[in-house]
Amino acid sequence: MTNLADYVFHNVPAQLSPLEEFLDPFTRAELDEIAPGAGARYLDLGAGGGSVTRMLSELAGETGQVTAIDQDTHMVAPGPNIDIHTQDLSTGEPLAAEGPFDLVHARLLTHHLENRVEFVHRLAGSLRPGGWLLLGEFVRSAPKVVSAPSEEHAAVFRRVLDGLYDVMTAKHTHGSWGHEVHRTMLDAGLTSVRTRWHFESWTGGGHGCRLFENNVSQKREVMIEAGIAAADIDFFLKDLMHNPDMVVRSHEFVSIRGRRD
Ligand SMILES: C[S@@+](CC[C@H](N)C(=O)[O-])C[C@H]1O[C@@H](n2cnc3c(N)ncnc32)[C@H](O)[C@@H]1O
């Protein structure tokens, strides 16, 4: 049984393309430092639109292998060295693919899982000695406006984004989990654990505001039920996120990696 009803968003290009445009450069930079290269076994969990699966496939080459797992794999493109499995990762069942792996990657997945701490321990245990675990998460922070045409524009942005974050963290997702991953990797016995923070400023009409727009439009009805004014949400969607006079801070992203000795 999949967990699509529980998952906060639907996998659509309007969401995953701007997300990948934001995050792929950070993930690529990590992989440039730690990826074992050709011939290795890679695992991409919560593969989503498949951009990291493609990066790993290039690194693995003809002699290596990438396994991509998600509960919704319709956007993950196949390839000669790519195995794709559709699996709900929240159940505690064994992974659809067995280790050991040289590199395990999961971006914006583990905060959705109630069993996230145990899951990170399992991933650490699936690594070959010398293998890396690379996780990425958003950390909830107060919405920040860099510049806006008026204080009312800024106030609407903050109200709507806070409402979105409330909805995103209302189930078992967890706005501060990104802070805890570093400690969890250490507790799981990983070494060389390192966390890097990334955020950007985004202009109305640009790729980042398209991501905010898609996040809020997917959750519009739930946000209204939670008490956010429909007029605020619609102003956010129709004006703020397209207004080149709005400059706002992005979601805050942490990239955490650890190595098995
Ligand atoms: C925000 S998207 C991130 C996609 C991709 N990792 C990226 O960063 O571009 C989260 C992904 O996790 C998947 N996901 C969420 N809960 C899941 C679960 N319980 N089991 C398997 N996949 C899940 C979703 O289907 C989605 O593809």
Image (cartoon, rainbow, N blue to C red):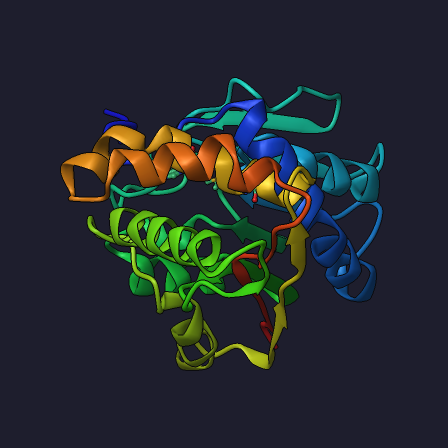
Residue 107 versus residue 11: which sits nearer the camera?
11
Tell me the residue at 50%/65% (across/down): 144
Residue 180 versus residue 78: which sits nearer the camera?
180
Location of the C terminus by quadrant is bottom right
- Above or below residue 17? Residue 244 is below
- Above or below residue 107? Residue 95 is above
Location of the N terminus by quadrant is top left
Residue 149 versus residue 46: which sits nearer the camera?
149
224 horizontally vs 7: left or right: left
In the rendered image, residue 83, in percent from the top left (x then y), is placed at 60, 27
**Residue 79 in sight from this viewpoint:** yes
Ligand 1 lies in which image quarter? top left
Give the quadrant of residue 211.
top right
In the rendered image, residue 218, in percent from the top left (x then y), is placed at 37, 29
| Picture mark count | 0
- Above or below residue 95? Residue 115 is below
Tell me the residue at 53%/50% (across/down): 106
Give the quadrant of residue 194.
bottom right
220 horizontally vs 39: left or right: left
Give the quadrant of residue 17.
top right
In the rendered image, residue 206, in percent from the top left (x then y), is placed at 69, 40
In the rendered image, residue 237, in percent from the top left (x then y), is placed at 46, 33
**Residue 97 in sight from this viewpoint:** no
Tell me the residue at 62%/40% (across/down): 243
214 horizontally vs 199: left or right: left
Tell me the residue at 51%/23% (across/down): 12
Residue 50 versus residue 249: which sits nearer the camera?
249
